[in-house]
Image (cartoon, rainbow, N blue to C red):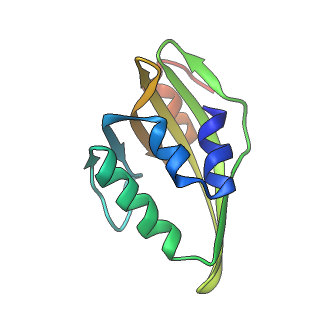
Amino acid sequence: MRATFEAWNAGDMDAVRELYDPDVSLRMPEGWPEPGPFVGRDAVMRQWNRQREAFDADIAVPISDFIDAADRVAVRFIWRGTGHGPESNMEVTQVITVRKGRVFLLEHFWDHAKALKTLGLSE
């Protein structure tokens, strides 16, 4: 799943797209302006592009280890954006479900402990 962050940070959204299952689903954190869920590769990529357009530059920086739990992986990261207005530094935890070698579900949580709980883990 490091490949997702590497492709995102390189601005290679075609590579990000290729990591996704055609039926991928994206769930944003509670209270997000566009709540979703976003279902299907095209819908997920449109959402990512909308978010990226809000900034001149952005980067996703993992700030924890990648936690493997069967077919899922969790990672806490900071999404930094600069450009159109104040700088943004959002800390979220992403839980990624993988099926047949592709990202099938992306879930985002403001609360890291709640994200780990979805994996049956605790801090």
Q: Nearer the viewer, residue 11 or 82?
A: 11
Write the residue at 27% across / 49% down.
37
- In the rendered structure, the answer to whether residue 37 lies left or right of residue 19 reads left
Inspect this view and state whether residue 110 appears.
Answer: no
Write the residue at 64% across / 84% down.
86
Residue located farthest toward the top when viewing the structure as drawn: 70
Residue 3, placed above or below residue 8: above
Q: Looking at the rendering, in which quadrant would you find the N terminus? A: top right
Residue 35, placed above or below residue 88: above
Q: Position of residue 108 (x, y in %)?
A: 46, 45
Write the residue at 35% across / 51% down.
44
Residue 85, placed above or below residue 68: below
Write the residue at 37% across / 54% down.
30
Residue 54, placed above or below residue 74: below
> Could you tell me how many numbered marks the image carries?
0
Q: Position of residue 81 (x, y in %)?
A: 64, 70
Q: Nearer the viewer, residue 116 or 3?
A: 3
Q: Looking at the rendering, in which quadrant would you find the C terminus? A: top right
- In the rendered structure, the answer to whether residue 100 lies left or right of residue 52 reads left
- In the rendered structure, the answer to whether residue 50 lies left or right of residue 86 reads left
- In the rendered structure, the answer to whether residue 38 lies left or right of residue 6 reads left
Q: Position of residue 38 (x, y in %)?
A: 28, 50
Dividing the picture into quarters, in which one does residue 107 lie? top left
Inspect this view and state whether residue 12 appears.
Answer: yes
